[in-house]
Image (spheres, helix red, strand yellow):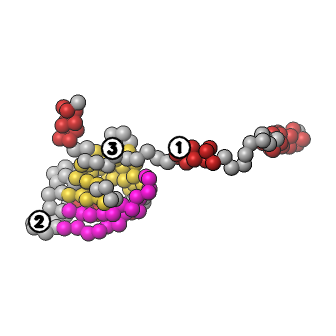
Amino acid sequence: MKKLIALGLALPLMLAACGDADAPENDVEEEAALDQEAAAPAIDLSGEWQVIAHNSVKLPSVFPAIATFDGEGGMTVNSTCVTMNFALNREGNMIAPEFLGKDTSGCGRPQTDGELLIEEVVPQSNILADTGHELMISGPGGTLRLARPAATVDEASSEG
């Protein structure tokens, strides 16, 4: 029985060693093709995204938080009285956000739990993902789920 197990383990190794000896060891074209396949498609961050949930808990929309992204890796989140700025430091779908500050001037109310949550979670995030209908920003602090605001979706569907 031990001989059969040893043969079963050795046979795949022998077959791998007997591969195509004429094949080049470093095929640059194949490596470039693999790199292109491995690269994640760019996520379209244009327009506005409403922060709708943290993990599976829906955020109240009394003071909606709207995120916009600039072409230089910046993310701004605005609600009725708070503007938060982040640098995403993005490489593909990986991010290393930095909290750049906030402006609460002229606001007569304290920050909402949702606004405080965004301020806390974004800097801890390390992944940006597009599910096809939502944008997710995830990390040790949890996952923020963002969706296109209803007005933006309605406008896009009426244009088509």
For mark 1, give the secondary structure: helix
Q: Which residue is mark 3?
A: 134
Are the residues tagged 3 and 2 within 8 Å (C-beta)?
Answer: no
Dot label at residue 107 = 2
Name which quarter of the figure residue 63 lies in. Answer: bottom left
The amino acid marked with disc number 2 is Cys
Dot label at residue 37 = 1
Which x, y percent locates residue 81?
14, 61
Q: Residues within 10 Å of mark 3 (few under 14, many from 20)?
A: some
Residue drawn at (40%, 47%) of the image: 42
Dot label at residue 143 = none
Which x, y percent locates residue 25?
72, 48
Q: Is residue 143 visible?
A: no
In the image, 125 versus 70, the foreground residue is 70
For mark 2, give the secondary structure: loop
The amino acid marked with disc number 3 is Glu
Q: Quadrant of the N terminus?
A: top right
Q: Is residue 109 visible?
A: yes
Q: Quadrant of the C terminus?
A: top left
Which x, y percent locates residue 60?
21, 50
Which x, y percent locates residue 69?
29, 54
The amino acid marked with disc number 1 is Glu
Measure the C-alpha gap from mark 1 to mark 2: 48 Å
In the image, 69 versus 67, the foreground residue is 69
Measure the C-alpha gap from mark 3 to mark 2: 30 Å
Residues shaded magenta: 83-103
